[in-house]
C-alpha cells in the first residue's frame, strides 16, 4: 500500500498513526496492496477554501475526500481486490481538536484525526451518510475499523465517538 501523509498545517500531528490507521482500514476493506492514497493535513484557511470551492459551504470542515479511480471494496465472491489510485483525504487538525473536546467521549486531536482518516477512506470507497441506513452502515463500519486498529495497537480506553456529521 502506498500512502503518503503530507502535513502542511503547521500543527504537529501524529503522522505515523494516520498512516497506520489508513493502512489498516484499506486492508480491512480488502483493497489491493498496490493501491495508492494521499493524506494531506492543512490549516483552517486552506480547508475553508477547499470547502467553499468543492462544497459551496462556508467555514472549514474536518475532512474532505477526493476520489480518483472510484475503487470499491470487493464483493465476497471476488478473487482479486481492486487496485488503483484511491485519491486524496484532506484533514484539518484545528477542526479535529475542537471536535475532540466537544465529543461525548472527549478525546485528543490525534484520536479525532485517526477517526477522520477512516471516515475519509470510507468516503473514497463509496460510502456515504446522507440517508439514515447509509449513515448506520458507514458509522458502524467506521467504529469497527477504529476499534480493531486500537485493539491491535493495544490502546486502552473508549474509542472516539463519531463526531463527523
Image (tube, rainbow, N blue to C red):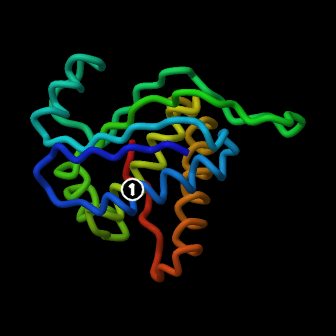
Residue 76 or residue 84, whichever sits in front = 84
User: Badge 1: few (under 14), some or many (20 or more) residues near its Cα, within 10 Å?
Assistant: many
Reading the image, the residue beneath label 1 is 18
Residue 97 or residue 14, whichever sits in front = 14
Secondary structure, mark 1, is helix
Q: Residue at x 42, y 54 (%)?
A: 19
On screen, 46 above or below 136? above
Q: Residue at x 23, y 65 (%)?
A: 101
Return the x and y of residue 45 as percentages of the image width and height.
10, 35
Return the x and y of residue 17 as percentages of the image width and height.
39, 62
Residue 156 or residue 83, whichever sits in front = 83
State the image quarter where residue 63 is shown.
Answer: top left
Q: Is residue 47 left or right of residue 39?
A: left
* Count of marks placed on residues: 1
State the image quarter where residue 84 is shown.
Answer: top right
Q: Residue at x 57, y 75 (%)?
A: 151
Return the x and y of residue 6 as percentages of the image width and height.
27, 44
Q: Is residue 152 left or right of residue 2?
A: right
Return the x and y of residue 60 as percentages of the image width and height.
18, 36
Q: Residue at x 13, y 40 (%)?
A: 44
Q: Quadrant of the C terminus?
A: top left
On screen, 14 above or below 76? below
Q: Quadrant of the N terminus?
A: top right
State the image quarter where residue 8 is shown.
Answer: top left
Q: Is residue 62 left or right of residue 69?
A: left
Amino acid at each position: 500500500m502506498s500512502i503518503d501523509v503530507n502535513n502542511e498545517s503547521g500543527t504537529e500531528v501524529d503522522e505515523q498513526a494516520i498512516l497506520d490507521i489508513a493502512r489498516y482500514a484499506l486492508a480491512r476493506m480488502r483493497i489491493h496492496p498496490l493501491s495508492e492514497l494521499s493524506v494531506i493535513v492543512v490549516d483552517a484557511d486552506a480547508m475553508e477554501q477547499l470547502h467553499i470551492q468543492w462544497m459551496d459551504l462556508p467555514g472549514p470542515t474536518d475532512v474532505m475526500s477526493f476520489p480518483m479511480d472510484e475503487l470499491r471494496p470487493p464483493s465476497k465472491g471476488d478473487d482479486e481486490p481492486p487496485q488503483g489510485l484511491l485519491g486524496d483525504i484532506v484533514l484539518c487538525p484545528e477542526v479535529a481538536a475542537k471536535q475532540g473536546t466537544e465529543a461525548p467521549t472527549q478525546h485528543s486531536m490525534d484520536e479525532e484525526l485517526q477517526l477522520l482518516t477512516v471516515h475519509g477512506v470510507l468516503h473514497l470507497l463509496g460510502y456515504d451518510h446522507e440517508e439514515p441506513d447509509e449513515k448506520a452502515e458507514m458509522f458502524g463500519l467506521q467504529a469497527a475499523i477504529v476499534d480493531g486498529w486500537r485493539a491491535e495497537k493495544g490502546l486502552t480506553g473508549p474509542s472516539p465517538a463519531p463526531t463527523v456529521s
